[in-house]
Amino acid sequence: NAGVTQTPKFRVLKTGQSMTLLCAQDMNHEYMYWYRQDPGMGLRLIHYSVGEGTTAKGEVPDGYNVSRLKKQNFLLGLESAAPSQTSVYFCASRPDRMNTEAFFGQGTRLTVV
Amino acid sequence: AQSVAQPEDQVNVAEGNPLTVKCTYSVSGNPYLFWYVQYPNRGLQFLLKYITGDNLVKGSYGFEAEFNKSQTSFHLKKPSALVSDSALYFCAVSPPRRGDTGRRALTFGSGTRLQVQP
């Protein structure tokens, strides 16, 4: 019962470096999401996908890119990291039904120095 | 656009006392509403949801929530708080239908930290 798995769990980047966060789910869910969590701001949606090969912008997409080449994987990329991207990133997935709950990964704590 | 408000950053309650964590929402049509809990350094865990029917829904760990359509609220409650309930709680809303692709995501409130004192 892996559920939603995020890799890596922790990372420190220097300003300007790039990296990719991987989210994998084994529940055959159609919808996948990337959120960032910052103190006092709750979870804000970065990008999301409603199916393999599709992506869409969320509330705070600037500075991030995503890809969903396989249904089970949703990648979040930072091309040129900035200190403002220091945050905890959560991936979530859920079935193609609006009345279902989302399942979350354990999070990735990213620090950009 | 849909939105969720959690007016209290923190709620303090003594162990054994009832607790309430407030949530109000704004969405077109009849919403689907959710509560999640987050323990330190962990992901979000689903507690309960309102889809339709009885306005009082029961969930995990003895929590329940009351849906009030006229007040657009979905407050989380528990009759007797435990120290182990101390955590960060999030309310979320999902639109009732798929609609266009821009409306398919869960929208979260800013979170309420619950502190239960022994």
Image (tube, grey):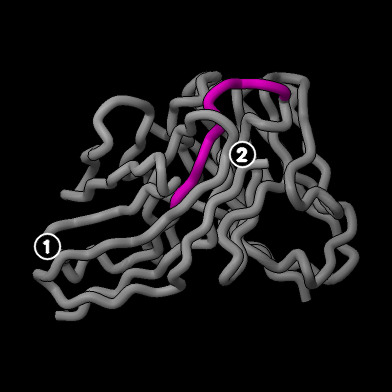
Q: Residue drawn at (27%, 62%), measured in percent from left and top?
A: B20
Most foreground residue, A78 or B35: B35
Task: Say if the magenta span includes residue B95.
Answer: yes
Q: Are marks 1 and 2 on the same chain?
A: no
Residue B76 horizontal side relative to residue B25, left or right: left
Where does the N terminus of chain A fall, quadrant-wise? Answer: top left
Task: Say if the magenta span includes residue B63.
Answer: no
Disc 1 secondary structure class:
loop
Q: Which disc number belongs to residue B80?
A: 1
Q: Is residue A68 above or below residue B4?
A: above
Disc 2 secondary structure class:
strand
Front position among marks 1 and 2: 1
The residues tagged by marks 1 and 2 sit, at their Cα atoms, a distance apart of 37 Å
Q: Residue drawn at (83%, 43%), measured in percent from left and top?
A: A65
Residue A35 horizontal side relative to residue B40, left or right: right
Q: Classify mark 2: residues with Cα within 10 Å, few (<14), some (14-19) or many (20+).
A: many
The stretch of residues the image draws in magenta is B91-100
Residue B81 horizontal side relative to residue B50, left or right: left
Most foreground residue, B6 or A20: B6
Q: Residue drawn at (76%, 52%), measured in percent from left and top?
A: A60
Q: Chain of mark 2?
A: A
Disc 1 marks a residue whose amino acid type is Ser
Q: Main secondary structure of the magenta part?
A: loop
Q: Chain of mark 1?
A: B
Most foreground residue, A40 or A88: A40
